[in-house]
Image (tube, rainbow, N blue to C red):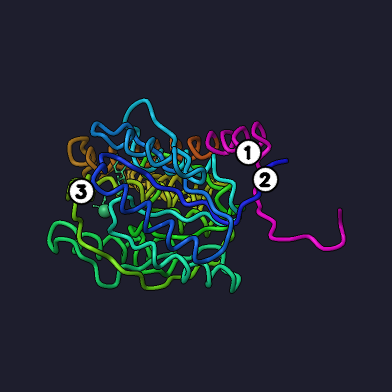
Amino acid sequence: MPEKLDISIVLPIYNEEGNLKELHSKLTESLTKLGLEYEIIAVDDGSKDNSFNVLKELAQSDPKLKVIRFRTNFGQTAAMSAGFHHAKGDVIITMDSDLQNDPADIPRLLEKIDEGYDVVSGWRADRKDKFFSRRLPSIIANKLIVKMTGVKIHDFGCSLKAYKKEIIDNINLYGEMHRFLPALAKWAGANITEIKVQHHPRKYGKSKYGISRTTKVILDLITVKFLLSYSTKPIRFFGYMGLSSGFIGFIICLYLSIGKLFFPSEDTSLIKRMPLLLLGVLLILVGIQLLTMGLLAEIMIRTYYESQKKPIYHIREIIGKE
Ligand code: UDP
Ligand code: MG
């Protein structure tokens, strides 16, 4: 009989040896109080410290703790993705393994899920990290992500979030996309809400990220925006740009031709006309390129959806049909 569980906790772990014992006991305390069936999936993302051995020891005395060990460091997104693939719970809760998130907030996340939301996002309203290198970039990034994706939550970067399993099943993660899970969930049609959660300073171990992730986030954001708006109609994206570029180029060349044909006496020396001619020709070529790129993208998305039998829609429920 397949195991049926209420909750799966997914923990990405990279060099967190000092935090794991306390995290495990706090989680167990908070989850046992709820009286629900749960599992904890710890994904050791190729830690170079003693994390794996600590986990192994903990798992010997706790059958609810499952440990997945990566061969090397594949990153937080990959670790979360592995956890999702192995999770059996109806609700999946992700959190950091460094005790910055507090397991005591889990019951409140679940309350919101019971109210009918598909995704409940934690919001570190009182965040305990450095201001200039961490909180300020994060505030700007969050504002930008809200604007671009239309998902109105305050804290995309907070790992403590709860998801219904069926939403996660519809999302594939790549790169460092875990930050955009709520936006990708919206794409899958999820109802999203947020609650304020506690945040503690890191006691053991070091943060794995710094200011250098800013550009990565911006590039990822462009990808997500494109996926959200155009993934089933790429010709609209490339086509509009291509048509406008081609049109402007056409007008320029038309203007030059009219001058050449009807006003040959005017000064039309090549040197004088050259820059405009170049621009016109360039814009037409770019326009054609973009249009054909859009058409190629249309062929590619057909291959993408049809080869994997992926639907272009997500059903919440069906009434009156087996
Ligand atoms: N993490 C991971 N693989 C990595 C980097 C980080 O699994 O390559 C885990 C890390 O152990 C922690 C979580 O992802 O549980 C968040 O990392 P961290 O606390 O360093 O990020 P911050 O809270 O400083 O943004
Ligand atoms: Mg942290």
**What element does badge 2 sit on?**
loop
Lower position in the chain sequence, tag 3 or tag 1: 3
- Give the residue type that dot 3 points to: Ser
Please say whether residue 257 is visible from this viewpoint.
Answer: no
Measure how far apart labels 3 and 2 are at the Cα level: 39 Å
Residue 48 drawn above or below residue 126: above
Q: Residue at left 37%, top 59%?
A: 26
The residue under label 3 is: 207
Q: Residue at left 23%, top 37%?
A: 274
Is residue 307 shown in magenta? yes
Q: Looking at mark 2, is its residue's CB closer than 8 Å to ligand 1?
A: no
Q: Nearer the viewer, residue 37 or 295?
A: 37
Please say whether residue 144 is visible from this viewpoint.
Answer: yes
Residue 75 image position (x, y, % from top left) = 33, 38
The residue under label 1 is: 305
Q: Are marks 2 and 1 in contact (CB under 8 Å)?
A: yes
Residue 55 image position (x, y, % from top left) = 37, 39
Q: Looking at this rendering, what residue extends furthest in the front direction?
A: 61
Q: Which mark is residue 319?
A: none
Within 10 angstroms of label 2, few (less than 14), some, or many (20 or more) residues? few
**Mark count:** 3
Q: Looking at mark 3, is its residue's CB closer than 8 Å to ligand 1?
A: yes
Where is the N terminus found, in terms of image quarters? Answer: top right
**What element does badge 3 sit on?**
loop
Q: Residue at left 24%, top 67%?
A: 127
Q: Which mark is residue 311?
A: 2
Question: What's drawn in magenta, residue-wise?
Answer: 296-322
Is residue 89 shown in magenta? no
Q: Looking at this rendering, what residue extends furthest in the top direction?
A: 71
Q: Nearer the viewer, residue 264 or 28?
A: 28
- Labels 3, 1: front one: 3
- Give the residue type that dot 2 points to: Pro
